[in-house]
Image (cartoon, helix red, strand yellow):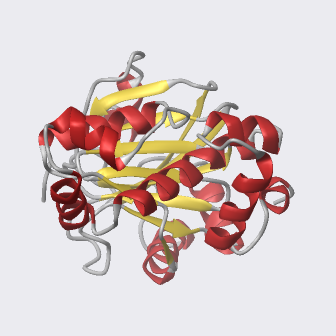
């Protein structure tokens, strides 16, 4: 697994997630609650344990060497042990709820970062779990609740809310710039010129490195990055312009093709 470091965030809240909150506990599965302000960032860090990051309110963007994962309402992201990652909160406050899992506890958990759907049962189990002490009794209701959380995580459907990043260093820098500013203009010819490549060479490289062609990757990244703004209640017009679209109609059409519903319906979720 690639655990290369990711750029440090401007605000370091990593101290809030140190071992006392779930890394070294008597029990192999524990839950922790952490409320974060809008636009706050937890700097690049890793955990000895795997963790499931879920927000009961708000949206998170999780970044690691392999790419970025958008975590909108009703979802969570699994981050395996030792994977260096950083977390940026969306444009509204986030009620972050984390389940820490000791390595080797369940073989069915993903070896890579993965966004999953959080069904109402899993959400309620996590909410109840954060109220338990870190040394909850074994052999009773508390332990069964934690085991049921693991059952539900393993059974949860995976979601394609991942923006893959290439390993090619200079190309990855351009990709990160677009992720940081999705309103920026991006073209195959323009990026090829910056990389001193022929456009056809870049097109082949992009497909090899990310599994997507250049245009599809840009559309996918911009759509996923628009979700936090939509969840925060911003207008479709404002979100469209902030994510590289000339009109809300073009953005809505692309959004509908990707998600099967218009952005206005996402706002009502």
Camera sees residue 220: yes
Identify the residue at image location x=64%, y=40%.
Answer: 95
Estimate the x, y position of residue 60 in percent, counting from the top left.
54, 43
Which quarter of the rendered picture does the C terminus lie within?
A: bottom right
Please tell me which residue lies in front, 133 or 207: 207
Identify the residue at image location x=53%, y=24%.
Answer: 40
Which quarter of the rendered picture does the N terminus lie within?
A: bottom left
Figure quadrant of residue 43: top left
Figure quadrant of residue 125: bottom right
Query: Is residue 128 rendered to the left or right of residue 133?
Result: right
Estimate the x, y position of residue 9 in percent, counting from the top left.
36, 23
Query: Is residue 262 rendered to the left or right of residue 46?
Result: right
In the image, is residue 224 above or below residue 57?
below
Please tell me which residue lies in front, 252 or 108: 252
Identify the residue at image location x=51%, y=80%.
Answer: 157
In the image, is residue 88 above or below residue 12?
below
Camera sees residue 26: no
Estimate the x, y position of residue 132 in percent, counting from the top left.
55, 51
Please tell me which residue lies in front, 18 or 178: 178
Estimate the x, y position of residue 154 in percent, counting from the top left.
43, 79
Identify the residue at image location x=34%, y=67%.
Answer: 212
In the image, is residue 186 above or below residue 70?
above
Please tell me which residue lies in front, 175 or 77: 175
Q: How many marks?
A: 0
């Amino acid at each position: 697994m690639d655990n290369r470091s990711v750029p440090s965030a401007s605000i370091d809240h990593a101290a809030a997630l140190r071992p006392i909150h779930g890394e070294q506990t008597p029990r192999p599965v524990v839950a922790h609650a952490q409320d974060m302000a809008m636009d706050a960032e937890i700097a690049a860090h890793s955990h000895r344990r795997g963790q499931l990051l879920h927000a009961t309110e708000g949206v998170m963007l999780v970044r690691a060497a392999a790419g970025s994962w958008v975590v909108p309402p009703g979802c969570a992201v699994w981050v395996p042990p030792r994977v260096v990652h950083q977390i940026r909160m969306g444009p509204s406050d986030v009620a972050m709820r984390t389940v820490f899992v000791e390595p080797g506890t369940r073989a069915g958990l993903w070896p890579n970062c993965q966004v999953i759907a959080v069904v109402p049962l899993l959400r309620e189990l996590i909410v109840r779990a954060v109220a338990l002490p870190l040394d909850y009794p074994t052999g009773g209701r508390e332990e069964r609740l934690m085991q049921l959380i693991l059952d539900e995580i393993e059974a949860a459907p995976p979601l394609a809310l991942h923006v893959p990043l290439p390993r090619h260093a200079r190309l990855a820098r351009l990709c990160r710039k677009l992720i940081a500013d999705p309103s920026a203009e991006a073209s195959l010819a323009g990026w090829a010129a910056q990389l001193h490549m022929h456009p056809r060479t870049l097109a082949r490289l992009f497909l090899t490195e990310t599994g997507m062609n250049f245009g599809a990757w840009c559309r996918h990244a911009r759509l996923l990055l628009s979700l936090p703004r939509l969840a925060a209640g911003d207008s479709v017009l404002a979100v469209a312009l902030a994510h590289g679209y000339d009109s809300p109609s073009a953005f809505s059409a692309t959004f509908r093709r990707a998600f099967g519903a218009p952005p206005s319906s996402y706002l009502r979720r």
